[in-house]
Structure formats: structure tokens, C-alpha cells
Image (cartoon, helix red, strand yellow):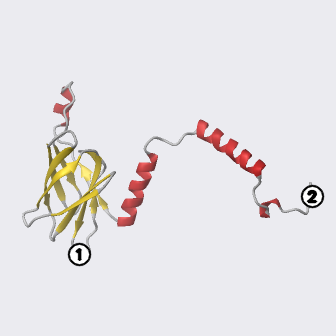
């Protein structure tokens, strides 16, 4: 080997690519990417990009839900954040769609609600009483995003299935 040659400045060749591929295969087998990591990273980046406040899903009646052995789909979700609280009721329309009725409290200005799903985003304004309806909304994994008017941070919920 020529000691005067700087290998770092030379382009990668076929042998380099085979070595890097072998290393990548070993790392994938020894330490695979955790399930859901990509979604968690996207969520974290979205929150950071929005400088959003993350709403917390409230547990109501968890002990009664644990006593049941059969599966029951949740019909009402409650979220709370520092700047607002939300209750969302889901009414099944059919196997593909639900009606979403919601109530937002604790806001001092107009609020836009977005349901961000895998395929699309639906948006609606909250009325003066804090109520909103999205009918129909496609079933699936979604995040609710609440965008208050003015210089107020948006609020985003964890992913839920509707």
C-alpha cells in the first residue's frame, strides 16, 4: 500500500459498497429498528416544528374497563392540556366512517380543529360555544390538532384510533 495515498479523498468503489452493505446487514440483525420508531420520530418532529403543546389523554373509569373481558370500542375521549381541554365523542356511521362531535373549553379565541390521518387532513372551526362536528371522518389512526387564533401555541394529541 502506498503511504502517500489519502484514501479518504477517493470515491467509494464496489468493494467499499459491499463492505458497507455487510456492516449494515449485521447491524440490522443485531440491533433492529424498534417498531413504531419512525412514527415516534415524525410525531416528535411535528411537535417541535409546531412548538405545540401536547395534550394528555385522560383516563376515565379505567378500573371498570379492566373488569370486562370483551373488547369495547371507546366512544368518548378526553384530552387536557395547559391551554385547553377537549372531549370528543365518536358515533359509528359504518365500517369505514365515524361522526366526530367535540367540545373545547378553556380557549379565549377562535379555534380550528384538524384531524390528521394517514391519508388526509380534515379541518373545521369551533363554534362560539366550543362545539365542533366532523361528519364523516374516516376510521383509522389520527391525531387531533387544535389551532387557536393569534399568537397561541397549537395543541396536538397523541395518536388515537377512531
Q: Write down the quadrant of residue 50 in the picture.
A: bottom left
Task: Residue 8: give x, y in percent of width and height.
Answer: 78, 61
Q: Write down the quadrant of residue 112 in the picture.
A: bottom left
Quadrant where the N terminus lies?
Answer: bottom right
**Is 106 or 160 nearer to us in this picture?**
160
The residue shown at (55%, 40%) is 32
Crowding near pointer 2: few (<14 within 10 Å), some, many (20+)?
few
Q: Is residue 62 above or below residue 69?
A: below
Q: Write down the quadrant of residue 105 in the picture.
A: bottom left
Furthest toward the top, the residue is 69
**In the visual, does 11 lie left or right of 80?**
right
**In the visual, does 58 lie left or right of 119?**
left
Crowding near pointer 1: few (<14 within 10 Å), some, many (20+)?
few
Furthest toward the left, the residue is 129
Q: Is residue 25 above or below residue 151?
A: above
Quadrant where the C terminus lies?
Answer: top left
The residue shown at (60%, 36%) is 29
Viewer-nearest of discs 2 and 1: 2
Furthest toward the right, the residue is 2
Which residue in the structure is indicated by mark 1? 150
Helix, strand or loop at disc 2? loop
The residue shown at (21%, 43%) is 59
C-alpha span from label 2 to label 1: 66 Å
Which residue in the structure is indicated by mark 2? 2
Nearer-N-terminus badge (2/1)? 2
Task: Residue 115: give x, y in percent of width and height.
Answer: 25, 56
**In the visual, does 29 lie left or right of 36?**
right
Task: Residue 23: give x, y in percent of width and height.
Answer: 68, 43
Helix, strand or loop at disc 1? loop
Amino acid at each position: 500500500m502506498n503511504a502517500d495515498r489519502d484514501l479518504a479523498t477517493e470515491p467509494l468503489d464496489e468493494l467499499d459498497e459491499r463492505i458497507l452493505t455487510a456492516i449494515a446487514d449485521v447491524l440490522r440483525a443485531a440491533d433492529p429498528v424498534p417498531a413504531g420508531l419512525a412514527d415516534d420520530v415524525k410525531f416528535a418532529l411535528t411537535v417541535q416544528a409546531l412548538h405545540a403543546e401536547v395534550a394528555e389523554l385522560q383516563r376515565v373509569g379505567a378500573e371498570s374497563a379492566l373488569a370486562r373481558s370483551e373488547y369495547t370500542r371507546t366512544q368518548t375521549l378526553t384530552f387536557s392540556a395547559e391551554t385547553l381541554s377537549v372531549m370528543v365523542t365518536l358515533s359509528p356511521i359504518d365500517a369505514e366512517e365515524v361522526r366526530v362531535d367535540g367540545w373545547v373549553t378553556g380557549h379565549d379565541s377562535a379555534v380550528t380543529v384538524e384531524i390528521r390521518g394517514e391519508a388526509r387532513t380534515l379541518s373545521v372551526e369551533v363554534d362560539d360555544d366550543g362545539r365542533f362536528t366532523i361528519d364523516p371522518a374516516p376510521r383509522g389512526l389520527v391525531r387531533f390538532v387544535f389551532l387557536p387564533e393569534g399568537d397561541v401555541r397549537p395543541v396536538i394529541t397523541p395518536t388515537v384510533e377512531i
